[in-house]
Image (cartoon, grey):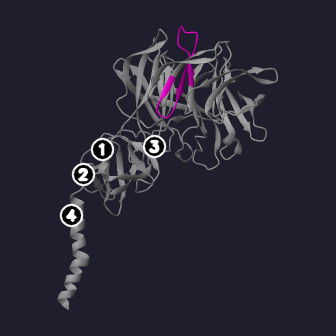
Amino acid sequence: MKKLALILIFIYFIVPLILYSQDLTVLPGGVLEKGDSAHVTGDYVRVRSGPSLQHRILLKVNSGTAVSVLQRGGTVEKIGNMENYWYQIKIDESGTEGWMYGAFLEKDEKTIPTTPPVIINKPQFVINDKPQISLKEIGSIAQKGILHVAADLNQNGTKEILLLHKEDRERYLTASGYESSTGGFTESYKFGFRNTSINNVTVFDYPDRREPIIAASGDNFTYFYNFDIKRLLLRLIYKLDTPQVGFGMLDGKNPYIVYLKKNKIIDNDGTLTYYIVGERIEYVRGRLRFSNKVEYEKPLPIKKLVVFDLDNDKRAEIISEIGGNGSGGGITVLQYTETGFKRIVNTGIPTYNNSTFIQMWGIRIGGKPKLVIYSTDPEGGNEVNSDFGFISASLQGTNLLVEDFMPVNKRLDDINNYRWVLLFDNGDSKHPFLFLDFNQDDGHYVVKKVILN
């Protein structure tokens, strides 16, 4: 009986300890304990709200980031070809706490130079009294659109509201240009797109060309067109396999197209990443010609792309919103150099539940370049019913300085479900935006001018 008791003790107590101790010794980088100092061994490593891939991404950090271990998860878990524990850690520089997979952590044996996290670096805030905005109703449009663009396609010096909508049982995508007139807006032209799977349209002017270039993008493509206003026809001049494009003078002299090239490797949580590519373009015999290709070395989880001279040096910067699958709020700014793209800003702006920005633009206000974001109040970004409005930021050296937040309405207000914001800058920096509020009862847009007070 005593012998049986000893066997049972060995099976239930000694064997698990032996296996546990063996388990601890085979893990790459060793096993971390509560109180250990460690550093991150990979780039763009996710810090999550809990110990699994299903938990929300709080931020991403780079190699060398210093952390403190708070606790170790209960069991070794396999992810791909890796086996390790989850650890609850605290980022030393910011104090942010979260969970990280142990395969990307290594215990400090000596002082490790720290590298700031990718997204947790917070921009400087100098918001004092929040400036207010007021809205002035200037007309209505009796048409519902699925895409909304401001552009001067008829080249008369004043922008039109371009609404894209589906017709003929939604088999065709049609664009209607509405111009301001006495008492409202009047449709001045209409033309069709051959492709109905367009989810974004960008219009930009090419130097020394009368006709603007229209870039129509889908999930995996962008078609470039010339628009013949007299015949109301689009003429295809180029196609790129990319979901987003931008345009600007990256070197201060020549026009460049900036676009995204998909990374073939998809992250474990389904996040898509892209390489940023810039190429000089020339318009030759009715076609676009590309040259001087430059590519940023690391793929980024890009949500939005803006090309704009943010530091007022006559050269456009590439401004991207980045974030994990379904999240956003990170800002990366790249600058063109003779040797390639250089990252000069890498920061984050708080949003509700880490959601993506609604919209983002580069514009000049009062003669000064600004990054303007339509999103939640950055000082109360995680409040359920936080304010929605315009965030205004400027580039100061390598810091993004958030200067103003101009509230419009609460996040839970119904108007958010039916409002579109257009950058409608006709040279008046006090009124650079229009609101299109859709009235479901009569099927009309109420157009409102945004007045910055």
Looking at the rendering, the stretch of residues picked out in magenta corresponds to 202-223
Dot 3: within a 10 Å radius of its alpha carbon, few (fewer than 14), some, or many (20 or more) residues? many
**Left or right of 22 in this view: 161:** right
Sequence-first disc among 2 and 4: 4
Q: In this rendering, does residue 371 appear at all?
A: no
Q: In this rendering, does residue 75 appear at all?
A: yes
**Residue 412 belongs to magenta span:** no
Give the residue number, with chain letter if any, for mark 1: 41
Residue 201 rendering spot, x and y as whole percentages: 57, 27
Dot 1: within a 10 Å radius of its alpha carbon, few (fewer than 14), some, or many (20 or more) residues? some
Sequence-first disc among 1 and 3: 1
Q: Are marks 2 and 1 in contact (CB under 8 Å)?
A: yes
- The image shows residue 209, relative to residue 9, as above or below, that is above
* Residue at image location 68% in from the left, 33% down from the top: 131
Give the residue number, with chain letter if any, for mark 3: 324
**Residue 221 belongs to magenta span:** yes
Q: Amino acid at mark 1?
A: Thr
